[in-house]
Amino acid sequence: AAGVIQSPRHLIKEKRETATLKCYPIPRHDTVYWYQQGPGQDPQFLISFYEKMQSDKGSIPDRFSAQQFSDYHSELNMSSLELGDSALYFCASSLGVRDREYYYYNEQFFGPGTRLTVL
Amino acid sequence: GENVEQHPSTLSVQEGDSAVIKCTYSDSASNYFPWYKQELGKRPQLIIDIRSNVGEKKDQRIAVTLNKTAKHFSLHITETQPEDSAVYFCAASLPRQAGTALIFGKGTTLSVSS
């Protein structure tokens, strides 16, 4: 079965440079999430999109921006990179289906991640 | 906002023993509680989830229990095997809209020795 695709898988940047991470959701999935995971830490939610509109927002720095395109893929743009931005960045996708209780109990399928190293 | 606490941070068991991981959440409105397994350098993968209208859910060797009154939920793994060794994360959310974030606990590193 098709899974979430992330590119690049590894990225090395210098401080103050910019980076763009790409995420291609599972076919038919209309919801994309971005999480940041530091070494030995839990995934921290950054931002999500549903049907190309921002849905939820977490601890995303102002230096970061993201969007979801018409084909549902998403890009996370990171500027003025800092050493502390070094982490694994996961994209997850889900199908935004509401159940009878009007909740979206949709499993989030995670991609393989992009390992960003800032030197 | 929601806060999830997870205990223990590390857990070592012998193959065949049971393992229990506990989580508490702060927002009484949260109603969705998934558990993810993450092997070193790999992606988190959902192993089981539970909604607040259910007190217990079981899938083969894995079970999850939920106590809404106490605001805590637990993962139970029976007959542990070496391949169960990984980091386990609990999470909580109130998915009123598509794209609702999962709030994760700090994780439990489970080591199963043979």
Image: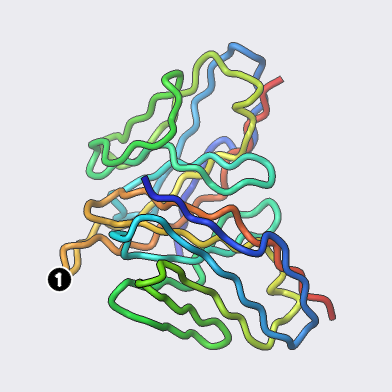
Q: Residue B19: percent from the left, percent from the top? A: 66, 78
Outermost residue, right side: B114
Give the answer, above or below, for where A21 lies relative to B76: above
Q: Which of the 4 quarters of the picture holds residue A58?
A: top left
**Colour scheme in the image?**
rainbow
Seen from the viewer's position, the closer of residues B101 and B26 is B26
The answer to whether A98 appears left or right of A22 in the picture is: left
Mark 1 burial class by Cα count in 10 Å: few <14, some 14-19, many 20+: few
Give the answer, above or below, for where A71 lies relative to B90: above
The answer to whether A51 appears left or right of B33 in the picture is: left
Count of number-bearing discs: 1
The answer to whether B50 appears left or right of A72 in the picture is: right
Residue drawn at the location 66% of the way across and 22% of the way down: A83
Seen from the viewer's position, the closer of residues A42 and A112 is A42
Q: Which of the 4 quarters of the picture holds residue B51?
A: bottom left
Q: Residue B114: percent from the left, percent from the top? A: 84, 81
Give the answer, above or below, for where A69 lies relative to B22: above
Classify mark 1: helix, strand or loop.
loop
Task: Find disc 1 in the rendering and name its residue.
Answer: A100
Quadrant including the N terminus of chain B: top left
Look at label 1 and name its amino acid. Arg
Residue drawn at the location 45% of the way across and 79% of the way down: B65
Residue drawn at the location 67% of the way across and 15% of the way down: A14
Q: Residue B16: percent from the left, percent from the top? A: 74, 88
Outermost residue, front side: B70
Q: Residue A72: percent from the left, percent from the top? A: 30, 42
The residue marked by circle 1 belongs to what chain?
Answer: A
Seen from the viewer's position, the closer of residues A68 and A39 is A39
